[in-house]
Image (cartoon, rainbow, N blue to C red):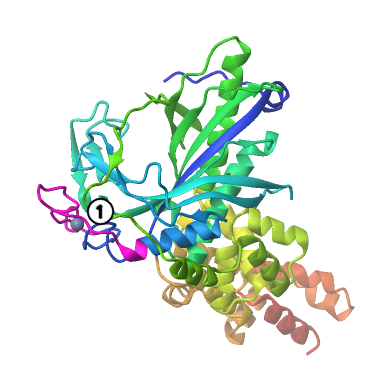
Amino acid sequence: MAKAELMDYAKALEQFEVVIGLEVHVELNTNTKMFCGCANEFGSEPNTNVCPICLGLPGSLPAVNKRAVESAISIGLALGCEIAPTGRFARKNYFYPDLAKNFQTSQYDEPIAFEGTIDIEVPSGNSYAIGIERAHMEEDAGKLTHVGGATGRIHGAEYSLVDYNRAGVPLIEIVTKPVIGAGSEAPELAAAYVRNIREIVKGLGVSDARMERGNVRCDANVSLRLHGAEKLGTRTETKNVNSLRSIERAVRYEIQRQAAILAKGGSITQETRHWHEDKGITSSGRPKSDADDYRYFPEPDLVPVQPSAELIEALRAKLPEKPADRRKRLQAEWAFADLEFRDVVNAGLLDQIEEAVTAGATAQAARKWYTGEIARLANAEDKDISELLVTPAHVAELASLVDAGKINDRLAREVLTYVLAGEGTPAQIVSARGLEVVSDDGALIAAIDAALASQPDVLDAIREGRMQAAGAVIGAVMKAMKGSADAARVRELLIAKANA
Ligand SMILES: [Zn+2]
């Protein structure tokens, strides 16, 4: 695919107004699927969590998962939505092998939640109110694996495998109204919005909210129009972007790509697009008209969902604190300066640091490791920190090993690389690899003597009070012991030797 022409970002913003719209799918973590009793479980053997209902066999009858409805209501309430006193499911008819029924059971004109609003803060500190059009319940499709092609897509594949374990897993689709007015911050706003949705569903406990597993997926609509124009421009929909960083990059890319086309007098094709993480580009998917006709009709096999006012109020009373309130509380508890805290929020590290603190780390130690070495390692591997094998418990353990003087910072960084390689917890690695700081006097004195042999004047210098001379010996000892010497103890022993 040819690389599209892009307009300089600042220039694109000068000429055009950006309008985005976000559709987020949240996979619920209910024990069972949306309409049957099959386990809702990630990572099972293919086609083991299936039954006549989620396979769409003739004569099977679905039933609604109560817990999924409650989760949907909680999400709607957290987004400031109205909850429909009655709502029906609808069949969205289409043929694709990942849904054996040939229709998806969804909601159409009667979503369970609608008309909400949520305030989202972006890295600059600016805040935007995002309107929520609707949040509705539906079921996920199965997973297709296209084998034999170069791209993993269906084109060029020799054959395809289908796994129906995910078919029928409960989903909540949350759709925003068009978001206008974010200007150059539209990409950051898109990512911050999805981060907030993640925080909300995680806080509610209704989803595992792991983007790398597809628990939270975002379709990003982007269109441009001339400043002052009333009519919205033609939009593209970049599908299934599955990390916050990718969302930001994909929206930015679409702004620059569309601006280049429009500036030349071209027109935007209304279509779905795919995001390519490796190349940092989107590519054309399939045309998508507003009039895609799925022949929606009310699902005849399910009764309408009619949550009682008591249920809605009980769920409202159980809502966790809002993400903005939680951020205020955490900043106060951790005593972070504004800038420190903003860095942590923008890096999406609140959960990790909170969990590391719960596991026993100090907030500052957790911040130091996450924003420093762990962020660097994630960057080097081009991954989100949440995708790395290091857990908050590991970080707490690492910090406690440093605090106890068992390892120093340099060894701790080395230990981290082994944690990432899956060798175990920091304590296990330190003991398996013998990485403890050497504070055994015998070994240290031997190394000091060896270093002094080539720098005999150092002892005199120390006796004369020129302490900087000690540095050369300490450095030589560290080098000889591959960084595992307890530097403070080396210094003490050296001074004792000079004054003996
Ligand atoms: Zn089933």
Residue under the point 26% across and 46% down: 299
Question: Furthest-left residue in view?
Answer: 58
Question: Furthest-top residue in view?
Answer: 265
Secondary structure that dominates the magenta span: loop
Which amino acid lies under the numbered mark 1 shown in the image of this protein?
A: Leu
Ligand 1, image quadrant it occupies: bottom left
Task: In this rendered view, identify the residue nearer to me: 319 or 200.
Answer: 319
- Would you name the residue on which mark 1 appears? 302
Residue under the point 86% across and 81% down: 463
Task: In this rendered view, identify the residue nearer to me: 167 or 409.
Answer: 167
Q: Where is residue 179 in the image (x, y as percent from the top left)?
A: 61, 38
Residue 177 falls in image quadrant: top right
Quadrant in which the C terminus is drawn: bottom right
Q: What stretch is highlighted in magenta?
A: 44-68
Residue under the point 58% across and 42% down: 190
Q: Does the segment drawn in magenta span residue 306?
A: no
Viewer can see residue 500: yes
Q: Is residue 315 left or right of residue 261?
A: left
Q: In this view, does 80 lie to the left or right of 24?
A: right
